[in-house]
Amino acid sequence: MTSPLVLAGPCSAESREQTVATAEALAAEGVRIFRAGLWKPRTKPGAFEGVGAAALPWLAEVKERTGMLTATEVATPEHLQTVAAAGVDAVWIGARTSANPFAVQELADCFAAMTPERRQALAVIVKNPVSPDLELWVGALERIYSAGVRRLAASLRGFSLYGESRYRNAPVWRIPIELHRRLPQLPVLCDPSHIAGRRDLVAPVAGQAMRLGFDGLMIESHCAPSQALSDAAQQLTPADLGDLLRSLPAAGAAAGNNPQLDDMRARIDALDDELIDVLSRRMAVSREIGRFKRKHAMPVLQPDRYSELMTLRRSRGRDAGLDDSFVAAILEAIHEESVRLQLKD
Ligand code: PEP
Ligand code: MN
């Protein structure tokens, strides 16, 4: 493992002062690529939608003062033309855009229409689409590659799943792992900020990504995180970001020990994480059923349903090559917890 490529900066460029102060502090922590959103895709209208092209002179100032490269999100051909003309070094296609093949194709057409020099001057990062659909992500990457873009990378920012989760966006690690298996030459970055959604979870997710062999990180950092106009809960101060970078598994150290074992352990960690998430979603549905039964005066325990469920799941377990008594023990534990919750709610 060589040292990871790091992009860091605020979710949004909010003012000249905030942009420049954040960038200077990040440069002092050794960050070489500065990110800041200009046009912000917000879930609901009325939230801060970014200052748009007005922030381009601030990015130019950051570049001039710190020597950092600059990166921002583009969602439309107009955004792309505007930032390309302003000398921004890298662009990313956000999760809501990469989920829409029409929008990605419009961006691809815009890349294809550029002069080769201008196209080559831009590095392009395609974030995963919001839904856990590997084909959609690969499709977006293919559209951009087919437009002649060769400095291309993917970035995992997590997926929006129904139900409760520890994360704002679930990492579903098997998807980027499969992406890497299919496209081994493509650098894959991780954006732990949008996965975590919370400051305290950013470092553990970043560490996990490094142990899984990701090529780099995109992390949100703001000079005054709690006052940020977007994604305030997940941004780190530049000093905390510096600590995080210094705490990452040392470049090459893990590989020096036992790369194969590290890789397997990282996969186990990722799968265990998924198991916990799935259990949490399973229990949320159990509670919903409990409330329904109470409302309709139905008993919590329905023995026929329980034995039918056990038979079906155990046979599925056997088909999947799992030991029968192991599967039975897990199912019993899950059922017991489910009954406990239904009696409690
Ligand atoms: C961002 O990077 O600030 C952003 C909006 O990203 P995403 O598309 O991953 O939500
Ligand atoms: Mn953000």
Image (spheres, rainbow, N blue to C red):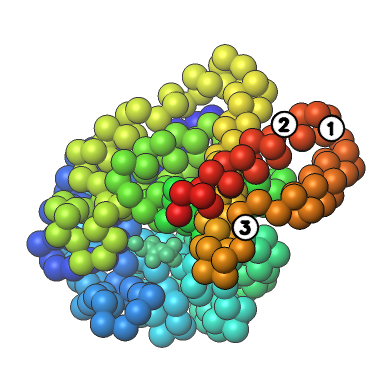
Mark toward the start of the polypeptide (2 vs 1): 1
Mark toward the start of the polypeptide (1 vs 3): 3
- Mark 2 or 3, closer to the camera: 3
Q: Nearer the viewer, residue 332 or 66?
A: 332
- The correct choice, above or below, for 332 with respect to 95 in the image is above
User: Which quarter holds ligand 2?
Assistant: bottom left
Q: Nearer the viewer, residue 76 or 314?
A: 314
Q: Which residue is mark 3?
A: 299
Q: CA distance from mark 2 to mark 1?
A: 9 Å
Say which quadrant the N terminus sits in: top right
Q: CA distance from mark 1 to mark 3?
A: 29 Å
Identity of the amino acid at label 2? Ala
Mark toward the start of the polypeptide (2 vs 3): 3
Q: Which mark is residue 324?
A: 1
Spot occupied by residue 238 in the image (x, y as percentages of width and height): 21, 44
Spot occupied by residue 288 in the image (x, y as percentages of width and height): 53, 62
Identity of the amino acid at label 3? Pro
Say which quadrant the C terminus sits in: bottom left
Q: Are marks 2 and 3 in contact (CB under 8 Å)?
A: no
In the rendered image, is residue 288 in sight? Answer: no
Identity of the amino acid at label 1? Asp
| Res. 18 image quadrant | bottom left
